[in-house]
Image (cartoon, rainbow, N blue to C red):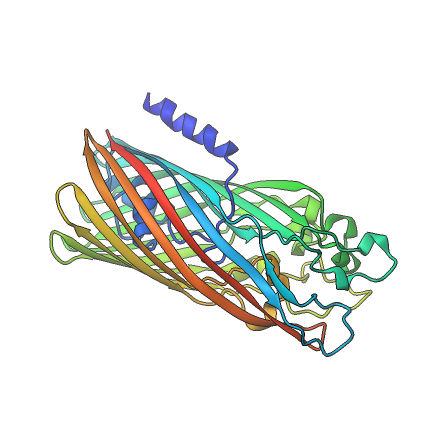
Amino acid sequence: MRKRILLLALISGLFLSLPAMATNGYWSYGYGPKSKSIAGACVAMSFGAMCAASNPASLVRVGNRIEAGASLFAPTRGFTANDDTQTPPYASIPPGEYKSANDLFLLPHFASNYMLDEQSSIGVAIGANGGMNTEYDSAVFARFSPPGVSEYQASAPVGVDLKQMFVGISYSRLLSEEHSIGITPILAVQSISVTGLEPFRMFSKYPDSVTNNGTDVSVGGGVRFGWLWRVNQQLKLGASYQSRLWMQKFDSYKGLFAEEGDFDIPPNFDLGFSYRFTPEWTFAFDYQRIQYSEVNAVGNPADLVFIPGSTLLGTDDGLGFGWNDQNVYKFGVQWQYSDDLTLRAGYSYATDTFENSQALFNILAPAVIKEHFTGGFGLKLGGGHELNAAFMYAPEEQVTGTNPNTGPQTGDLWMDQWEVEIGWAMRF
């Protein structure tokens, strides 16, 4: 029966179409309701199977579990183009406010862990990232089109839809009473669809592979390593590292993304601790670094001036989104209010995803969120069952940027978001 559950989870995960989630860049701030309720400060906690996404070394300490749930994620995002162009309107964006459609997403998750013996366990977790999900109803780049050339005339809608799904199978082992380690081979599936960028075909090595080519899918993978040290009954230290996930190229968009459509998933690492002040109160802290600059399609500069005859898109040095490596600081607290009820809260702060000068192309991916305020609870229902819930609010952030093609034209990118997640878990 247990083997069937694991197999069903893997098969289901491969066919899930998970919407985009723009939190820290396109990285989720946490995985599962327990982690999310403490702002993702999970690398030194051992309270659930979804924590494998942060640190697989924790699984050997959580016992036999199965978890499933879903979140309702609601981002509001868009940009404002100012009427301050200092040159003729060519290569400018018509002044006004542009709000992206698609403001409500359903995001499922699943995880389980099975103890092989007292010293080792194997688990599976399914989660998602995303963040480049925008759809503007007007032809935003209409003024970038040369008059009278139909193949370069901008269409509507304009946007990018990126989806990423991960299936990780984790092995965790106790080395001693104090130390455990874990390893997670990861299968990743991602898809992308791009619309409304016809004018940029003029500046591409592969003009037929820039926009409006439907949904392209790529598959790949990598590995995550984790370590957990239980220093004493109060203090735990944790660390994990996820390698670059090497993905197939997006052939349908090799004329848009750098390195002929290469869109690997960047490496990242987490360091943290948890401290149990009393039997009821635990504090957790994580530091995470997401190395976006390692992937040219995301990290290459986005502030280039478009000059007819130049090749900017699709080459190794082609236009990217100008994203920085991002530092994320996560703080969480857990209060064991009673034997059956646990209350949690958290806060995270992230450094800027990109600089003001990189704003033009990032209207397609306005990943400007920096703060997350979170809370939640866990309720034991009897018979080994649990109900966990998490709530998140990310207040609006704005980045004022420029369009270097127009003298420059200025504008603002903005986003705010909230999320509610409910999860069921069972110990067996």
Q: Is residue 296 visible?
A: no
Q: Nearer the viewer, residue 2 or 306?
A: 306
* Residue 146: % across, % down: 83, 62
Q: Nearer the viewer, residue 59 or 150?
A: 150
Describe residue 238's horizontal placement relative to residue 407 as left or right: left
Can you say whether 184 is above or below 200 in the image?
A: above
Q: Residue at x 29, y 46 (%)?
A: 34
Quadrant position of the N terminus in the picture: top left
* Residue 193: % across, % down: 64, 45
Farthest front residue in view: 96
Q: Residue at x 49, y 46 (%)?
A: 104
Describe residue 100's horizontal placement relative to residue 241 as left or right: right
Q: Nearer the viewer, residue 241 or 363?
A: 363
Q: Residue at x 47, y 33 (%)?
A: 13
Quadrant position of the C terminus in the picture: top left
Farthest right residue in view: 148
Q: Quadrant of residue 185?
A: top left
Can you say whether 301 is above or below 126 in the image?
A: below
